[in-house]
Image: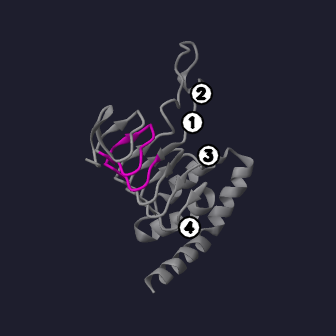
């Protein structure tokens, strides 16, 4: 019975968000899709409580590459790339900032986690040209399923299945599955398999 009520709530929230979703698609047709997503994300991030969680999921499930309707997208979570995948059971803590990424099933991100679109977002080799005009490469970062990313971490590389990332860590290299990592730059402390 509880699952049926949740499914109905997911559908009602998707219907309530339909006008905003429609506006998103209209503006995306005329402007840069990711810029439109960013502005919608900023507005939607301000809706507090459980209602906000359900309404955000009702919007993002239609505009992302994939977003499970049961994803918990907390207060003040911002997104910058529409090519984002959020699997079932994902929890994104308050004030996260999420770039181009794929977040696996049952993964938890603590508050203030930044998932950047790789570590090559900004070129800075030309001393004559402003950094903002030098461009960069946006990578899609993958965080495996059943991971726990501690508060305030910065993720710029892929994280394998079942990893734990200590609070405040800066991940700049791919991390193997079932690792416990921490530090700046983050290093493997031990494997969860031993």
Which quadrant would the N terminus be assigned to in this image? bottom left
Which residue, given by chain and number where applicable, does mark 3 sit on? 34
User: Which residue is situated farthest in the right direction here?
Assistant: 30
User: Residue 94 in the image: x percent, y percent?
Assistant: 38, 55
Q: Residue at x 62, y 57 (%)?
A: 63
Are the residues tagged 4 and 2 within 8 Å (C-beta)? no
Question: Mark 2 = which residue?
Answer: 135
> x and y percent of residue 149 in the render?
35, 49
Q: Which residue lies under the disc numbered 4?
A: 58
Asked if 49 appears above or below 25 in the picture, the reply is below
| 139 left or right of 2 in image | right
Q: Nearer the viewer, mark 4 or mark 1?
A: 1
Q: In the rendered image, which residue does mark 1 sit on?
A: 138
Identify the residue at image location x=58%, y=31%.
137
Mark closest to the chain's N terminus, 4 or 3 = 3
Nearest to the eye among marks 2 and 1: give it: 1
Residue 102 lies, in percent from the top left, at 51, 50
Query: In the picture, residue 26 is in which quadrant?
Result: bottom right
């Amino acid at each position: 019975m509880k699952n049926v009520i949740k499914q109905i709530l997911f559908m009602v929230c998707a219907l309530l968000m339909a006008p905003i979703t429609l506006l998103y698609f209209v503006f995306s047709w005329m402007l840069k899709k990711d810029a439109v997503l960013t502005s919608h994300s900023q507005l939607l991030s301000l809706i507090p409580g459980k209602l906000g969680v359900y309404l955000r999921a009702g919007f993002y499930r239609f505009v992302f590459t994939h977003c499970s309707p049961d994803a918990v997208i907390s207060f003040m979570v911002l997104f910058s790339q529409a090519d984002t995948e959020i699997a079932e059971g994902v929890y994104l803590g308050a004030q996260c900032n999420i770039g181009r990424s794929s977040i696996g099933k049952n993964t938890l991100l603590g508050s203030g986690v930044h998932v950047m679109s790789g570590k090559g977002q900004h070129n800075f080799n030309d001393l004559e040209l402003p950094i903002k005009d030098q461009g960069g490469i946006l990578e899609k970062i993958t965080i495996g399923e059943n991971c726990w990313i501690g508060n305030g971490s910065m993720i710029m590389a892929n994280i394998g299945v079942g990893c734990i990332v200590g609070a405040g860590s800066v991940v700049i290299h791919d991390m193997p599955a079932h690792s416990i990592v921490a530090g700046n730059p983050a290093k493997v402390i031990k494997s969860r398999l031993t």
